[in-house]
Image (cartoon, grey):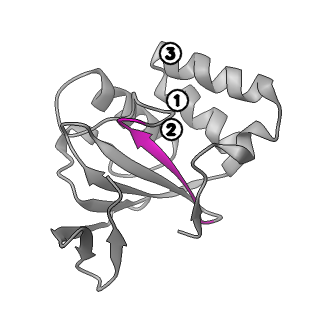
């Protein structure tokens, strides 16, 4: 991931109408529309990094251009949660399907794990405030 767009600047630069449309999709719990609104600004989704969950679930949506967006607890998209049977996981599953992911079952996700578009999973382990991934990379936890 190149950088985290914490304030959704790329979407905001397209005008308040785009931000309002995303908020309506979030409020209605429409995973397909949430993806469509984000894709209009960020392009295709390449990976989801599930950092923590299911309680206070946090993840990062990584788009093809390397820009990441926070999702889950304490984010602009709090409805995208995972790891349990409920509305948030259902919305996230629909979001993943709309993004063209082959593995779309957000209820079965156990963090930390990185999920690729093709269904590949890279498992991780939390060690001293960071996630050590099985592929040898790491992610600092700021949660």
> Picture coordinates of residue 137 (x, y %)?
34, 82
Say which residue appears at 47% left-offset and 47% top-offset. 70
Secondary element at image label 1: helix
Using the numbered discs, state the Cα–Cα distance from disc 3 to disc 1 in whole angstroms.
13 Å
The disc label shown at residue 32, or none: 1
Q: Which of marks 2 and 3 is nearer the N terminus?
A: 3
CA separation in Å, label 1 and label 2 = 5 Å
Q: Give the range drawn in magenta.
A: 66-74
Mark with earlier residue (1, 2): 1
Reading the chain from its start, which is encountered first: label 3 or label 1?
Answer: 3
State which quadrant residue 73 falls in: top left
Rate crowding at label 3 as few (under 14), some (14 to 19) or many (20 or more) other CA atoms within 10 Å.
Answer: few
Label 2 SS: helix
* Residue receiving disc 2: 98
* Distance of label 2 from label 3 (alpha carbons): 18 Å
**Image-based side of 9 in relation to 140, left or right:** right
Our reading of the magenta stretch's main secondary structure is strand
Closer-to-camera residue (129/122):
129
Secondary structure state at the residue bearing disc 3: helix
Kindly identify the residue that appears in the image at 70 percent across and 28 percent down: 19
Residue for badge 3: 27
Neighbourhood count class around disc 1 (C-alpha, 10 Å): few under 14, some 14–19, many 20 upward: some
């Amino acid at each position: 991931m190149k950088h985290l767009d914490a304030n959704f600047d790329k979407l905001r630069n397209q005008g308040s109408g785009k931000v309002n449309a995303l908020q309506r999709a979030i409020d209605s719990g429409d995973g397909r529309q949430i993806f469509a609104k984000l894709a209009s600004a960020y392009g295709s989704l390449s990976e989801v990094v599930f950092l923590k969950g299911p309680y206070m679930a946090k993840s990062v949506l990584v788009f093809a251009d390397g820009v990441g967006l926070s999702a889950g607890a304490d984010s602009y998209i709090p409805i995208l949660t995972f790891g349990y049977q409920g509305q948030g996981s259902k919305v996230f599953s629909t979001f993943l399907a709309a993004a063209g992911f082959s593995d779309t079952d957000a209820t079965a996700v156990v963090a930390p794990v990185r999920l690729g578009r093709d269904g590949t999973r890279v498992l991780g382990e939390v060690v001293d405030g960071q996630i050590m991934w099985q592929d040898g990379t790491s992610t600092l936890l700021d949660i």
